[in-house]
Amino acid sequence: MSPSERYTAAAYLVVFAAVLLYVVIIASKLQRLEREVTQLVELAKKRAPDG
Amino acid sequence: MRVVKLPVLATVSTALLGLAIALAFFYAPADADQGLSQRIFYFHVPLALTSYACFGWGAWKALRHLWKGDPGADLESYVAIHQGVIFGSLTLLTGSIWARISWGVWWSWSEDQLVLFLVLFLFYCAYFMLRFSVDAGPARANMCAVYALFGVVLIPVSFLAIRLSKKFIHPVVFTAHGPQMTGAQFLTFCVCLAAILVLFVTLYTLELAGKRLDASLRELRELLA
């Protein structure tokens, strides 16, 4: 593999890795939001008059 | 933009990115001077143009916030600028890799285009320092909107820098006589630009949906507390 091929592959991989990292960050945030929704649902059930 | 559009946007974005990579490597002819490294151009320039679009969109939303007091415009401006910084950092990274192959250096301080883009990038990085150093509320939203509007002035300066520069080390592909490339190269470039722009719209919609959901949950928790 020539240096030009290596660097070109690196440039494309940088973009791919950045998008992947972004998706991972968003996915972890969604998991946190999901946990919060579950907690709030439980809290709302406890607060309900017949709960 | 509605959250229900997200799966469609994500599908179109993935398909366009796949097509763009295929065209860049298997359809576009190799450049006689630069060889394989010229293929970095197909993503580097769309990334730069998309970051300009992000900052421009962020400034437009900031203007809407100040002018019309649009609810949510401050958040939309913030998310657009966040995306602009991400695309801007990718522009700098891919540009540096290309410079290493073509010029033998990672960076050149004598290049007006590079330095002005870095100034634009750092200006918008400082936006986050401002935003997170002030408590949330109307004052923060107004300050951030004014800052975002100031930054938009740097976009045409950065874009025109290579045309105003006397050195012309940085390649100029789009001149007054049109794009300086073959039809196949131009088609590939257009597909790559469309792919990166759709990727921006997808990530922008996704991040905005997450932030809005986060805000709604915070409100709900306060109500239930």
Image (spheres, grey):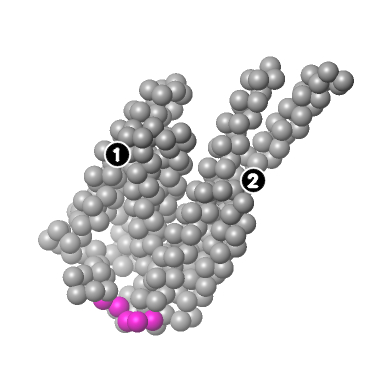
Q: Check disc 2 and report the residue beneath it.
A: A27
Mark 2, secondary structure of its residue: helix
Residue B181 drawn in magenta: yes
Q: In the displayed structure, does residue B108 sit left or right of residue B23?
A: left
Can residue B197 be seen in this snapshot? yes
Percent from the top left, x then y, of residue B76? 45, 40
Q: Quadrant of residue B164?
A: bottom left
Residue B112 or B55: which is nearer the viewer? B55
Percent from the top left, x then y, of residue A47? 79, 19
Residue that protrudes farthest toward the left in the picture:
B166
Task: Identify the chain of the residue marked 1, using the numbered disc in the image.
Answer: B
Residue for point 71% across, 37% down? A34
Q: Quadrant of residue A26?
A: top right
User: In the displayed structure, would residue B97 be above or below residue B129?
Assistant: below
Q: What mark, if any, has residue B149 been given in the picture? A: 1
Q: Which residues are magenta?
A: B180-184
Compute the Cα span from label 2 to label 1.
31 Å
Percent from the top left, x then y, of residue B28? 42, 80
Can residue B111 be seen in this snapshot? no
Residue B70 or B222: which is nearer the viewer? B70
Mark 1, secondary structure of its residue: helix
Are the residues under marks 2 and 1 on the same chain?
Answer: no
Residue B77 drawn in magenta: no
Residue for point 59% across, 53% down? B6
**Mark toward the viewer: 2 or 1:** 1
